[in-house]
């Protein structure tokens, strides 16, 4: 079976035919239809758990569950909705045994003075999400809500950090109601809750988000192509980084810039603190960088010179206010370079 058509009518007809074949045990038809939705499901799981690697495993588990339960699909909803329901519950099972993921900048603000800071190995942080993975979703049919919502602020790091602090079922209710656009009745059926429980959970989740989300939105809009000024700022950041020019880097920053470096806890506050830290590692030619995008923001993938070649080191995700860098989150996750489509050496 080929890929599902993106024409609304032919697509629905093809899906109905595929579903009938699936219920008869046609594994090839199931694989083709499930693969059509895999990237959307992964984005959904990423929102739920905040981990790129875990989201890949959870999507695979959801697809396996769907295959085992294929005869239970009665056609009362779309096949996509049925898959989302299964994937959501897979994520809820996962979250019962996993700690909250967050950003070091947020975590550092919660540390009480004088309290012990956990070892880095004990902490878990959000993963950056490669913009390239949104391409298949964004090019899908226009009447699909996920095609629109993939380009909104629901993949912003601030949003993801905020929803990680919601209890898992509140998080699920918020995502399926406000991101996927499901009705309260559909959400209640998917999560085995009553409609009043869904309404109450959504109200509490929205109240928590209002408290945790930053008041000042970032200038770079998620899902939009960067302007020439934005590209120029990213280029200046990369050039200064490669030259080891700390003064030039500092000139791109707001006075109150916040720099976080997962997996290290806490954050550096202010331009001068950044300058003092950068002086310890900056050197001409020590780093090379490639431009990329993550979570709707511009990013720089940095490589460090080691054993005669430049090796993956970190993905710097940038936030901008008033034409200057307001935040830099340096994800020390070289294992994620492949997911960003980046080379393993330069």
Image: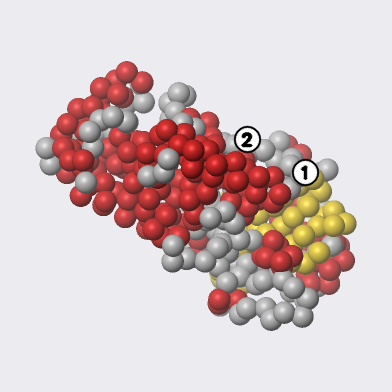
Q: Residue furthest top?
A: 9
Q: Which residue is mark 2?
A: 224
Residue 297 in view of the camera: no
In the rendered image, the vertical position of residue 143 relative to residue 50, given as above or below: above
The percent position of residue 243, horizontal first and vertical second, equals 76, 63
Which of the labelled discs sits on residue 216, or is there none? 1
Left or right? Give the position of 121 relative to 93. right
Q: Secondary structure at mark 2?
A: loop
Image depth: mark 1 or mark 2 in front = 1
Task: Give the Cα distance between marks 1 and 2.
Answer: 18 Å
Nearest to N terminus: mark 1 or mark 2: 1
The percent position of residue 117, horizontal first and vertical second, equals 67, 78
Quadrant for residue 81, please give it. top left
Q: Residues within 10 Å of mark 1 (few under 14, many from 20)?
A: few
Compare residues 161 and 72 and report the one nearer the observer: 72
Q: Residue furthest left?
A: 24
Compare residues 257 and 249 and report the one nearer the observer: 257
Q: Quadrant of the N terminus?
A: top left
In the rendered image, the vertical position of residue 212 relative to residue 81, given as above or below: below
In the rendered image, the vertical position of residue 276 relative to residue 322, given as above or below: below
Q: Secondary structure at mark 1?
A: loop
Q: Residues within 10 Å of mark 2 (few under 14, many from 20)?
A: few
Q: Residue at x 48, y 47 (%)?
A: 172
Compare residues 173 and 316 and report the one nearer the observer: 173
Q: Residue at x 65, y 72 (%)?
A: 264
Q: Quadrant of the C terminus?
A: bottom right
The percent position of residue 107, horizontal first and vertical second, equals 67, 65
The percent position of residue 196, horizontal first and vertical second, equals 49, 38
Compare residues 71 and 198 and report the one nearer the observer: 198
Q: Residue at x 31, y 55 (%)?
A: 61
Left or right? Give the position of 68 relative to 155. left
Quadrant for residue 222, please give it. top right
């Amino acid at each position: 079976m080929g890929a599902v058509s993106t024409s609304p009518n032919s697509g629905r007809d093809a899906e109905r035919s595929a579903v009938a074949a699936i219920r008869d045990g046609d594994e090839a038809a199931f694989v083709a239809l499930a693969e059509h939705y895999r990237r959307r499901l992964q984005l959904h799981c990423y929102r739920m758990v905040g981990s790129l690697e875990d989201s890949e495993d959870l999507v695979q588990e959801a697809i396996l569950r769907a295959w085992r339960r294929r005869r239970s699909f009665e056609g009362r909803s779309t096949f996509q909705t049925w898959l989302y329901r299964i994937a959501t519950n897979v994520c809820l099972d996962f979250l019962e045994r996993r700690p909250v993921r967050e950003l070091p900048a947020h975590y550092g603000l919660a540390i009480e003075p004088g309290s012990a800071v956990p070892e880095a190995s004990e902490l878990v942080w959000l993963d950056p999400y490669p913009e390239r993975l949104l391409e298949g979703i964004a090019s899908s049919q226009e009447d699909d809500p996920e095609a629109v919502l993939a380009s909104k602020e629901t993949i912003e790091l601030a949003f993801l950090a905020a929803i990680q602090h919601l209890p898992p079922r509140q998080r699920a209710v918020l995502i399926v109601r406000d991101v996927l656009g499901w009705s309260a009745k559909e959400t209640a059926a998917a999560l085995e809750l009553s409609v009043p429980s869904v309404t109450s959970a959504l109200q509490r989740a929205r109240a928590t988000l209002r408290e945790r989300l930053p008041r000042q939105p970032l200038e770079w809009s998620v899902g939009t192509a960067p302007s020439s000024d934005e590209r120029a700022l990213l280029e200046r950041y990369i050039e200064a980084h490669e030259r080891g020019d700390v003064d030039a880097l500092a000139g791109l920053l707001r006075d109150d810039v916040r720099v976080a470096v997962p997996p290290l806890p806490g954050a550096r506050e202010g331009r001068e603190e950044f300058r003092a830290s950068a002086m310890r590692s900056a050197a001409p030619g020590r780093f090379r960088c490639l431009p990329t995008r993550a979570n709707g923001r511009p990013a720089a993938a940095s490589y460090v010179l080691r054993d005669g070649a430049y090796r993956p080191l970190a993905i710097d995700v940038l936030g901008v206010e008033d034409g200057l860098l307001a935040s830099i989150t340096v994800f020390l996750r070289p294992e994620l370079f492949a997911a960003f489509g980046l080379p393993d050496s330069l």
